[in-house]
Amino acid sequence: MKNLIFFFCLLQSLHGFGQIKETQAIDSIFSELNKPNVPGCALGIIKDGNLIYTKGYGMADLEHQIPNSINTLFDIGSNAKQFTAACIVLLVQKGKLNLDNKLSDFFPEFPSYANKITIRHLLNHTSGIRDYLTLQFLKSPGENKSYTDSEIMELLVNQKELNFQPGDKNLYSNSGYWLLGQIVNKITGMDLAAFAKKEIFEPLGMNSTDFQRNYSQIAKKMAYGYAPNGSGGFTISMPTNNEIGAGGIFTSIEDLKKWDEAFYQSKILNEDFWSIMLNKCVLNSGDTLGYACGLTISNYKGLNTKSHGGEIAGYHSEMMCFPDQRVTIILLANRLDVDPTGMCYKVADVLLKDQFKVQKNTSQNSELTRKDLESKYSLEQMSGTYAIQNGVNLQINRQDDSLHVNQTWNNISYKIGRTIGNTFQNPGFPNITFSFTNLQNGHSNLLLIYQEGRNHEWKRIEDRQLVQIKPEEYVGKYYCKELDVIYELTVMNDKLYALAGKMGPVELSAVDSDQFSYQGFAKVRFKRNDKLISGFELDMDRVLNLKFEKMK
C-alpha cells in the first residue's frame, strides 16, 4: 500500500506540469534515487517562467514513507547566501546602506583591520575574515556544539589577524554572510529572518520559505537529511547550528520558481537591484572573478550561467540558471552522497544540447591552447605528482586512454578525459578543466586547474625521500590565544599525533622540514627560536596562519 501511495504521488507531481519529450532521458539521470526506500531529491525545470517539468525522486521521510515533491521543504545550505545578499542590496536601494561602508561602522569592537573591510568585501568573499565554522571546529574539535550569535561574534572579534589583506584574494567565508545578517539587524532593528520575510518572501509569494533558527522544530512537508550508514541503509543527518545569514533557509521547488521569475520581471526587485546583485568581484590587482552577491557568474559549453550550490549535513542543493535561454534547473536533495551540480549539468546536456556553442578554451589562455594543439603530450608525459602547496598533492597516472586523479588529502579519485589539446575534464564536473603545460625534460611541469573563473597553478614535484624528523622534538602543549584552546602533541609508535577537545589522536605526516599535514586538510608549520620549537602556525580550510605558542 505504501508503494502504491508513493507511485500515486509521483504521478500527481509529474502530470501537474505535463510531459516533455526528454522525460525518459532526464529520469535516467536520477534512476538510483527513484526508489521508495531511499532518500533522494526534488527536481524542477523552468522555461520562460513556467515549470515545464518537476518530479520527486525518493523519500522525504523514510520512517513515514513520504515522497519528495514540488512542495517538499529542503535546507538549501549556502544557496541562502543570495537571499542574504538581496536583503543588503535592498537596503542599498533604500539609501540606508552603502557598499563601501566599513565593517567598523557597525562593529567598532573588531580589531583595526575592520577599518579596511567593506560591505562589498563581505559580499564577494574578499574580506580575509576567517571562517567561523572552521574556527568553531578548531576551538571545540569533536563536538557538535551550537553557537549563539553572541558567541560567534566573540569568536570573530578575538581574531587578531586576517587570512589576507581585504581585496587581495577571494576565499569563501561563511563569516562574511553571517556578519551581513547582523548588519541587517543593526540597520533595521529587525532580525534577518523577519526582514527577508517582509521584504522578499511575502511580496514574491514565497509563502513556504523562511530562515530556520531551530532545527529541532518539526515543520510540515519538511524533508529530513540523510547520510549512508555504510551498510546499505541511511541515518538521519541534520544540521546542529542555528545561526542564519550564511545559510539556514528552508524552501521548495515551487517557491524557488517564484524567485527565478523575479529575475526577469518583478516590481519588487527591479533592474537596478539585479545589476548590483550580478556585479562581479574585482580584486585589488584588477582581476575580475566569477563571484557576485551570493551567485557564481560563469558559462557552460558557451552558454552564460548564474548559479550557486549549497550543502549542510544531509542536504544538498543547486540552482542553475541559463538566463539567455530563460531556462533554470533546480535540484534540492536530502541525502549526503548526491552531487546536485553534476546532475544539473547532465539535465542541461539533455535540454540544451542543440544550443551549446563551440566551447571556448576554459583555461583563458589561447596561446597555451594553440601550442598544445600543435603538439599533444602523451599521457605518460602528464603523469606525476602536482602540488599547489606543501602537503596538498594530486597524483595523476595513466589509466587506459584517460588519466586517473587521486586527491591525496581526502583520497578521492576520478578519471579525466582529453577534450582539446592537453586539456582534460571530469564528465561529472564539466565546469572544471585540467590543462597541462610547460613541457620540460619529457614531462609537463605545470598543471592549470580552471575553476570558478580562475586558474589555479599546481607544480610538478619530484618523488623524493622526506626529511628525517625527530617526532619527540615537537612534543608538548600549544596554546592559541585567539581561540583560547590548548592542543597537545604526543608521540605514539614513533609518529606524531595531535589531541584536542573530544577529538581522538590525529596523526600528523611530515611533508618538509618542520612542516606537517593532516590528510592535506590541515597544514602545520613549526617555528623555532634558537633551534628550539617555539610554536606553530595552522592552516585549515578557510582559516590561515592561526598561531599557537608552545607552553613552558
Image (spheres, rainbow, N blue to C red):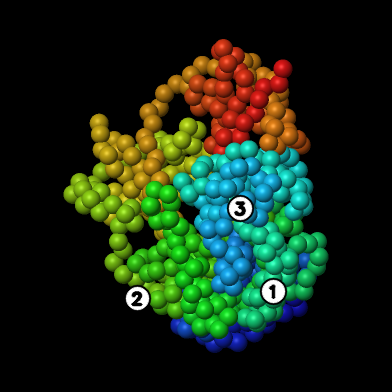
Who comes first in sequence, dot 3 or dot 1? 3
Mark 1: few/some/many CA within 10 Å (<14, 14-19, 20+): many
In front: label 3 or label 2: 3
Mark 2 sits on what residue? Answer: 354
Q: Is residue 75 left or right of residue 265?
A: right
Q: Give the alpha-carbon distance from disc 3 to disc 1, as whole Å.
A: 25 Å
As drawn, 383 above or below 40 = above
Mark 3 sits on what residue? Answer: 103
Residue in the image at 58% along x and 43% along y:
113
In front: label 1 or label 2: 1
Q: Check disc 3 and give the amino acid type.
A: Leu
Mark 1 sits on what residue? Answer: 197
Q: Residue furthest top?
A: 530
Q: Position of residue 459 (x, y in %)?
A: 37, 36
Badge 1 marks a residue whose secondary structure is: helix
Q: Give the alpha-carbon distance from disc 3 to disc 2, as whole Å.
A: 47 Å
Q: Position of residue 367 (x, y in %)?
A: 23, 50
